[in-house]
Image (cartoon, rainbow, N blue to C red):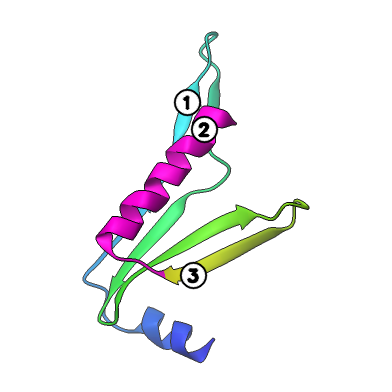
Amino acid sequence: ARSFAAMLRGPKPGAGKFGAARRDRNGKRHPAGAALVYLATERGGHTLQPLRGPDGTAWTTLAPATLTQLAQRVDQLLTSIRTG
């Protein structure tokens, strides 16, 4: 927790928040369950990703992320609205 707090206090040369939604045939909007957050820090890139476990329990994953891994996580977000 201390490393995470130190990372958040330090300089962040970039950041982004990715969300996704789709519209059904009637025009009703169906958003993804949560947004994906990306933080570029002096220690490298990281994602914060709210998820649900198999039992429905909500949890958040903080993970290092290269740009390739960020693209994969954005793709997972898009897949969640296609299948959800």
Q: Is residue 13 left or right of residue 63?
A: left
Residue at label 3? 62
Q: Residue at x 47, y 25 (%)?
A: 22
Q: CA distance from mark 2 to mark 1?
A: 6 Å
Query: In the structure shown, which secondary structural element does the residue marked by tag 3 occupy?
Result: strand
Whether 75 is among the magenta residues is yes
Closer to the N terminus: mark 2 or mark 3?
3
Residue 3 in picture, x, y percent from top left: 45, 88
Q: CA distance from mark 3 to mark 1?
A: 26 Å
Closer to the N terminus: mark 2 or mark 1?
1
Residue at label 1? 22
> Which one is in front, 3 or 67?
67
Magenta residues span 64-84
In which quadrant of the rendered view does residue 40 lie? Answer: bottom left
Residue at label 2? 81
Q: Is residue 38 left or right of residue 54?
A: left
Q: Residue at x 39, y 79 (%)?
A: 8
Give the residue type at disc 2.
Ile
Query: In the structure shown, which secondary structural element does the residue marked by tag 1 occupy?
Result: strand
Dots 2 and 1: beta carbons under 8 Å? yes
The N terminus: image quadrant: bottom right
> Which one is in front, 41 or 53?
53
- The label on residue 44 is none
